[in-house]
Image: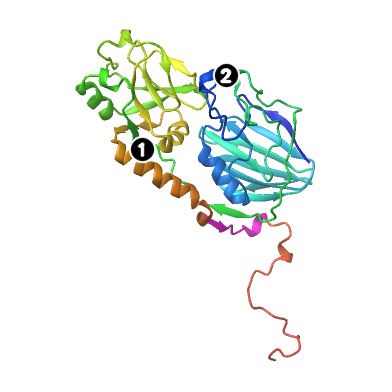
Amino acid sequence: MSLIVLAAGLGITVQDLGRPGFLAQGLSRGGAADPVALAEGAALLGQDAGLAAIELAAAPARFRLTAPARIALTGAPFRALLRDAGAETPLAWNASHALPAGAELALSPLAGGYGYLVPGGGIDAPLLLGARSAHLAAGIGAALAEGDSLALGPDPGTQAELRIAPLPRDSTAPIRVVASLQTALFPAAEIARFQRTAFRRDPRGNRMGLRLDQGDAPGFAPSGGLSVVSEIVQPGDIQITGDGTALVLLAECQTTGGYPRIATVLPCDLYRVAQAPPGAALRFRLVGQDEARAAMQAHASALAGLRSRITRRLREPSTMADLLSYNLIGGVVSATAEGSER
């Protein structure tokens, strides 16, 4: 069973939860920019969150299935169309679907961000250093291209037509950050100004990181920032460049850097930063260790409870080609059946 790539825009890759444990060898974890979307897709399919899926970085794509398969569509919303036997049917986002063999799936972005196509059984790409995900910055794997054939793993499940209420991705709520190794280099007034600043997500960015636009406000400057030596960095670190611009490092960031870091985004909030579309407002709030631990525990509980957010999807009659096979009114019986009232 395979998924054939008919067309693929820039930056479309296979992603899973990445490769932890290789920082000493110069390899960041990588993996999905929005791991919560992977977990939501896996929950819809009743499978493990470690499934490898297709990450669509705000780029259109078309695929064809060689056999019947279940899929889940999660993350930043895309326009999804199923083309089969000359008919074109829209598919709901944050939902699972059963697709027939030979069907074509067309996906096009609506507002930016990372969308995910999660097949039942996952993408059965070769394991490399314990993961199937592409890490383009490290030269592992490659972006998908027209003509690629992606093997799918065995899917033990059968349920489809389910919907999930996704976890919040609203970037207007403050992004929680904790102090980094260089936060103390910044004067208290600069840290307070950083938290007051209404940033905008700059259009420049990729899986390595994104820039924050502070408009006409002056840049941020540490005391003795030029004395910082290059040291370990990680996703979520907010670096301040020489001109005072803030950069948030994402999943595929480098493993060392010499720019001072004013703060670090909590992992439980980093997916909201990654999914913020260009121009979106972003504010940051420095929290203490106790609040940070509580936030991480609450996030872990939310992930563990994803299946409680799933309901059966109510289908639109206009999209049901097999409408007559459904009992649309419960309890109706034939007027001529034996035992029925006359």
* Quarter of the figure that contains the C terminus: bottom right
Q: Residue 339, image x and y in percent?
A: 72, 90
Q: Residue at x 52, y 37 (%)?
A: 35
Which quarter shows the N terminus?
A: top right
Q: Is residue 289 left or right of residue 83?
A: left
Q: Is residue 203 visible?
A: no
State the residue position of label 1: 172
Counting residues from the N terminus, which is met first, the one under dot 1 or under dot 2? 2
Q: Is residue 84 above or below residue 317?
A: above
Residue 258 percent across, percent down from the top left: 39, 12
| Res 137 label | 2
Residue range in magenta is 310-319
> Considering only vertical position in the picture, is 276 above or below 39?
above
Which image quarter: residue 130? Answer: top right
Residue that appears at 55% across and 18% down: 25
Instruction: Please give left or right for residue 51 compared with residue 171 in the image.
Output: right
